[in-house]
Amino acid sequence: MNRHTSPVHRHPCLPASVFFICVFCLCLPPHALAFKITEPAAGATLSSGSTVTARVDVGKDTGIVKVRYYWYGEQDEVLVEQDDSTAIGSIVAPVAMVRSAEREPAFGGPLKVPQDGIGPMRLLAVAEISRGRLGAGSVFDEVIVKVEPSAALATIDFETEKPLHLGRAGQSSAFGHVDSMGKIFELPVVADFADDVTRRISNPASGTSYTSSNDQVIKVVADGLLQIVGNGKTTITVSNGGKQASLDVDVKVNDEPNDPPIADAGMNKSVKAGSRVKLSGLKSRDPEGEALYYSWSQVRGRKISLLDANNSETSFLAPTVSEPRTYRFKLRVTDKKGADSLPAFVDVTVEP
């Protein structure tokens, strides 16, 4: 026995059989109450293109037939429609792996990390449950890991026309209608690595930073987003891993002053499964008092159908869960003149 470990003594009134059962239980590893990803662990750092072992603990969720694994970027809004017709629920992403109980480990196995992955990524595992005459159901779990390329970064560049013209005249259609003061947009940036893989690095979470040579024309705001604040010319510079690229931008939009609106998605909340949940953006506001256009989307958790996603208030039916699960939603608002807000987020924890 380790000299730092105290021996376990049996109380004289405790039967020996009960004593040994209790000691045995104390030595058992903790068991999940519900379906849970145990490997890779949340927060783990993985190499892009590598193969890791995926493991799950089914907990008290019985009747699981198959488990499907999906990779997403941390803030991807791709949960829109069914992509895999054999899967349960609405998921848009290639299925990274499908496993059954007959495999070793059960419902897990070798899982390839996306070759072009970089930065925070979500691993979503969806378990298909057979309930006999009651039909089929599903449970899920997800973890966020950090993906890093093992190869060195060679070059970075803006994936757009050069120079870039924003405004009603000569505007690139790739950016939609970027023709208003206060409009927020993102510039796609890609990087070539020594392993001959091109990866998108627009998100600052991948180590990318932006600067503008003229903050009176385009201002860098949160999460690598850019905002039009005036007419004129500026140079946007992107940096990552000691590499840089520059893009000249010419902005010619309407010159009517317009302060951007502010989105408010409400407070985080906990709800019971099966309840009707309402999300409210009514506290969003516009400094000039203009009417607002609303856009709700989901960026965390298994897909939930949102009702009235383009209204100030949206709602959904809290799904059945066997353990608390957190869903994250994003709200963006736009005023009548076309100025955008920064995104606002709200977390809803669904409890059994």
Image (cartoon, rainbow, N blue to C red):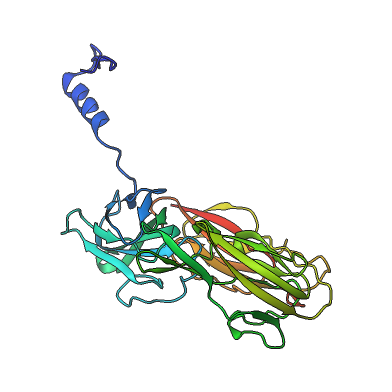
Residue at the location (67% across, 70% down)? 235
Q: Is residue 11 left or right of residue 306?
A: left
Considering depth in this image, is 322 or 147 the residue closer to the camera? 147
Q: How many marks?
A: 0
Q: Please identify the residue farthest to the top as the structure is shown.
A: 12
Q: Nearer the viewer, residue 352 or 51?
A: 51
Residue 115 picture location, percent across and down? 35, 65
**Image position of 153 with respect to 135: above or below:** above
* 231 w.r.t. 116: above or below: below
The residue at 49%/58% (across/down) is: 206
- Residue 125 is left or right of residue 203, and the answer is left
> Which of the pair 291/148 is nearer the observer?
148
**Residue at the bottom extreme?**
169
Q: Please tell me in which quadrant of the rendered image residue 288 appears.
A: bottom right
Q: Is residue 266 visible?
A: yes
Residue 340 appears in the picture as rendered:
no
Left or right, 218 with reference to 61:
right
Q: Which residue sits at x=42%, y=59%?
A: 122
Toward which corner of the image does residue 310 lie, by quadrant? bottom right
What is the x, y in percent for residue 231? 78, 75
Quarter of the image with the N terminus in it = top left
Q: Residue at x 52, y 57 (%)?
A: 242
Could you tell me residue 128's position as x and y percent?
Answer: 29, 64
Image x and y of residue 188, in percent:
54, 72
